Amino acid sequence: MDAAAEAGRRFDLTLQEGPLMGMIEAIPMNLILAETREAGMTWLETIQRGGPVGYLILVMSVAALALIIMHFVQIRRVALLPPDQLTALDDLLRRGDVGGALEFCLNPEHDSYLVRILSSGLTRFQKSAFGAFEIKNAIEEAGEDQTSRLYRSTDAIGVIGNIAPLLGLLGTVVGMVGAFEAIGQTGAARHEELAGSISLALITTLMGLTLAIPCIALHTFFRNRIDTFASEAAMEIERLTLHLESSGSGQPAAPGQGAR
């Protein structure tokens, strides 16, 4: 037991007087405290550590959130194909009142994806001697145009989703440049400056990816919804135009006059 105790005492002396203890004592206490504080760092502090790039990503996040809410409101079936408009147009065209249906579509109060497409077909139907044969082409052209507009309205979300990772990468590069400059100027890495620069790099990368992932996913989601509602609109408009073909005359009705 005495030999074991003596060996333990000598090991303690070696540890205290040797280079290992010197290396342990060389670790700055404030670095340990900084790591402890960073473990409970708030989101606001995280953004502040991101620097100018972090604030830019934050502004883009607010813009993306506004666009996402706007598209959730606009790209809905009840907004693109209002049921009351379908009912009113079905009643007018069933009675052969093409003029009344066109007047209904051109009313600014009834503006929607549905009436903008149908109004082009009804206008061609009334103004052309071959309107009954040209109405489908007019509706297809108008449908492609209106659908393209909906697609373009979602491009901003896609652009933000593509730019955000690049901004995060920019912050990473800026942070690493700062870290290597600190090493080059002092000849040795100062822990606070090096940790701050690396933190900047990691935070901006995190923020960029956090913004990009939902934006890219929602961009695809909205485009799929547009495709779905465009297909539904095509079927509904085809059903409405069948009333014109089944009216028997195949000639455009006079404006404001229905079938008697």
Image (cartoon, rainbow, N blue to C red):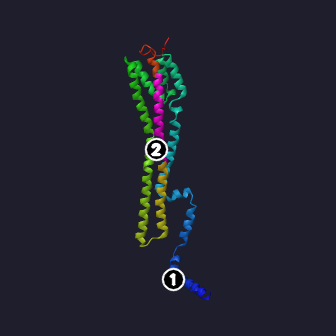
Dot 1 or dot 2: first in sequence order is 1
Q: What are the residue bounds of the magenta stretch?
A: 214-240
Q: CA distance from mark 1 to mark 2?
A: 60 Å
Residue at numbered disc 2: 157
Quadrant in which the N terminus appears: bottom right
Q: Is residue 90 above or below residue 13?
A: above
Circle on res. 127:
none
Q: Residues within 10 Å of mark 1 (few under 14, many from 20)?
A: few
Q: Residue at x 56, y 68 (%)?
A: 33
Q: Main secondary structure of the magenta part?
A: helix
Type of amino acid at the residue the image marks with label 2: Ile
Direction from residue 201 to residue 42 in the image, left or right: right
Residue at numbered disc 1: 18
Residue at far top of view: 260
- The image shows residue 225 at horizontal and vertical percentages of 48, 37
37 and 10: which is toward the camera = 10
Proximity of marks 1 and 2: CB atoms separated by less than 8 Å: no
- The image shows residue 102 at horizontal and vertical percentages of 47, 21
